Image (spheres, rainbow, N blue to C red):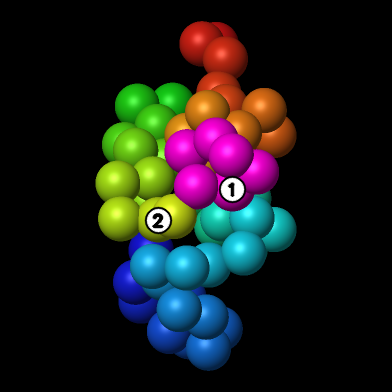
Amino acid sequence: MVCWCLSKHINPVSAPLNAIIEHMTHLFHLGREYRTINLHRFAISKPHPPIDPERVWRTPCVSLSTP
């Protein structure tokens, strides 16, 4: 995510929700597996501040359902 954010001039620690969703969509379109995208979701959530008041991984539009 860091390289992806830097290429888009986004701070990876405080990226806006739409950038996080765009990054995960990018991974999906690259053909990454569910577990890889899920790993990114948790890695992003760890240092990221809460968003309304949920952690990033619990935000409904970022929450992933098992395939």
* Secondary structure category for the residue under label 1: loop
Residue 26 magenta: no
Q: Where is residue 37 shown, x and y percent of the image?
A: 42, 38
Q: Where is residue 62 shown, x and y percent of the image?
A: 60, 36
Instruction: Identify which residue is drawn at 47% across, 38% down.
Output: 55
Q: Where is residue 5 shown, x and y percent of the image?
A: 46, 75
Residue 42 is drawn in which quadrant?
A: top left
Mark 1: amino acid: Ile
What residue is shown with label 2? 48
Q: Residues within 10 Å of mark 2 (few under 14, many from 20)?
A: some
Instruction: Identify which residue is drawn at 38% across, 67% down.
Output: 13
Q: 42 or 36, which is in the foreground?
A: 42
Mark 2: amino acid: His
What residue is shown with label 1? 51
Residue 54 is drawn in which quadrant?
A: top right
Q: Magenta stretch? A: 50-55
Instruction: Identify which residue is drawn at 64% across, 55% down.
Output: 17
Residue 32 is drawn in which quadrant?
A: top left
Q: 53 or 65, which is in the foreground?
A: 53
Can you see residue 53?
yes
Can you see residue 33?
no
